[in-house]
């Protein structure tokens, strides 16, 4: 029979293991150090120059007198070339610059003249600063124009940079000949752009959703899938249009930018042909975006001579649509950049983003998305 020997010594237990895990701060995970971008800004400047064989007061008159400006650049409406005034430089085809005058210095005898203003394309584009400088020379006047932009569209340098030499030539030719040199209307465009809060992928995802397109595009039918026909209301008194989507590039789909865009054709009842259309988005600093649309192929409407009313209607539609898009983005993402992450005391200059706080926008491809 078994022996109950309770007096036998108890078996010896192994000591408790010494390793019980580590706190996250004792051995942090790799690639999770909390790094994030603070700013992704771009400043650009365009400088163009021409020498005009005319005295500075003659050049100043051509630059500041509304009746003369209408002969070589655009029709002036409002307080053009008046200090603190606001004016519109109207191309009379639906597109214009909305200007706020900042500095007006008429050239004194043998001195320099200066005209400086802010302007926005069709009133809703990013503001840039333009400065005209007139300097008298022994044989005429040297005219220098400088345009400066902060986080402009990526093609701003090429579009505006190629445009300024032509504008200076128009001014010089008008002064020399007295002949109007304005184009009657442009076969490209309208081109509309506006800044939106929110990173590019966030904004595109919001604006291309079905409920959003009903609001900001005034969509009545269809979807933004390739091959779809989308019904649009251009305005209460402007009628309807049909957008035929030919290509929809989603985020991450195309190297090297990975940015989304939409290509389409646009037709209206009574039009003999269709316009080409391009809608795209890109970053505008850290945590912001700029959405743009551009049309071409007005030659297809050549039997409407010239189709200025249609062009104006289309410009007005996109200005209104982008305004509604801005309302959606402001509601979703707010008007300002995000504040610093909790627990971080960042020494960021107040003028970096207007708040003095770091901008927590986690980097996607090229730091453009969350």
Image: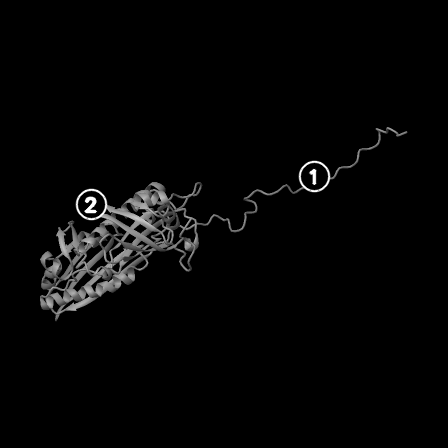
Does dot 2 land on a helix, a strand or a loop?
loop
Residue sticking out furthest to the bottom: 139
Q: Quadrant of residue 274?
A: bottom left
Residue at coordinates 30% horizontally, 48% vertically from top-left?
231
Does dot 1 land on a helix, a strand or a loop?
loop
How far across and how far down the image is residue 156, in percent?
Answer: 29, 59
How far across and how far down the image is residue 92, in percent?
Answer: 16, 55
Q: Quadrant of residue 52?
A: bottom left
Given this view, does label 2 or label 1 mark the residue nearer the observer?
2
Left or right, residue 25 beside residue 202 = right
Q: How is the image coloured?
A: one colour
Q: Which mark is residue 237?
A: 2
Q: Nearer the viewer, residue 262 or 197?
A: 262
Mark yes or no: residue 136 visible.
no
Determine crowd level at label 1: few under 14, some 14-19, many 20+ residues with C-alpha closer than 10 A. few
Mark yes or no: residue 242 visible.
yes
Determine crowd level at label 2: few under 14, some 14-19, many 20+ residues with C-alpha closer than 10 A. few
How far across and how far down the image is residue 111, in percent?
Answer: 13, 62
Q: Quadrant of residue 248?
A: bottom left
Left or right, residue 159 beside residue 208 = left
The residue identified by callout 1 is 16
How far across and how far down the image is residue 226, in percent?
Answer: 38, 54
Q: Nearer the viewer, residue 142 or 369?
A: 369
Q: Nearer the viewer, residue 71 or 260?
A: 260
């Amino acid at each position: 029979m078994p022996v109950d020997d309770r007096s036998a010594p108890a078996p010896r237990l192994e000591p408790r293991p010494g390793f019980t895990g580590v706190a996250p701060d004792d051995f942090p995970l790799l690639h999770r150090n909390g790094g994030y971008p603070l700013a992704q800004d771009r400043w650009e400047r365009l400088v163009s120059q021409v020498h005009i064989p005319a005295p500075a007061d003659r050049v100043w008159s051509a630059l500041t007198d509304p009746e003369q400006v209408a002969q070589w650049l655009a029709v002036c409406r409002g307080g053009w070339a008046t200090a603190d005034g606001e004016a519109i430089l109207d191309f009379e085809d639906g597109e214009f610059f909305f200007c706020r005058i900042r500095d007006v210095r008429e050239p004194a005898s043998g001195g320099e003249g200066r005209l400086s203003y802010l302007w926005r394309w069709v009133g809703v584009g990013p503001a840039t600063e333009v400065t005209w400088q007139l300097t008298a020379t022994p044989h005429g006047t040297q005219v220098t124009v400088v345009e400066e932009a902060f986080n402009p569209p990526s093609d701003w340098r090429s579009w505006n940079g190629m445009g300024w030499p032509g504008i200076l030539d128009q001014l010089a030719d008008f002064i020399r000949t007295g002949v109007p040199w304005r184009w009657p209307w442009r076969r490209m465009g309208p081109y509309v752009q506006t800044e939106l809060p929110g990173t590019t992928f966030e904004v595109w995802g919001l604006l291309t959703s079905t409920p959003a397109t009903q609001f900001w595009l005034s969509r009545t039918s269809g979807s933004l899938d390739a091959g779809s026909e989308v019904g649009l209301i251009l305005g209460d008194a402007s009628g309807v249009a049909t957008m035929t989507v030919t290509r929809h590039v989603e985020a991450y789909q195309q190297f090297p930018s990975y940015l989304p865009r939409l290509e389409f054709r646009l037709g209206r009842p009574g039009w003999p042909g269709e316009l080409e259309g391009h809608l795209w988005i890109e970053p505008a600093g850290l945590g912001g975006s700029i959405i743009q649309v551009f049309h071409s192929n007005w030659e297809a409407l050549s039997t409407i001579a010239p189709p200025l009313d249609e062009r104006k209607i289309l410009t007005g539609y996109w200005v209104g649509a982008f305004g509604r898009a801005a309302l959606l983005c402001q509601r979703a993402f707010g008007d300002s950049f995000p504040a610093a992450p909790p627990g971080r005391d960042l020494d960021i200059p107040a003028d970096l983003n207007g708040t003095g706080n770091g901008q927590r926008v986690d980097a996607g491809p090229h730091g453009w998305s969350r």
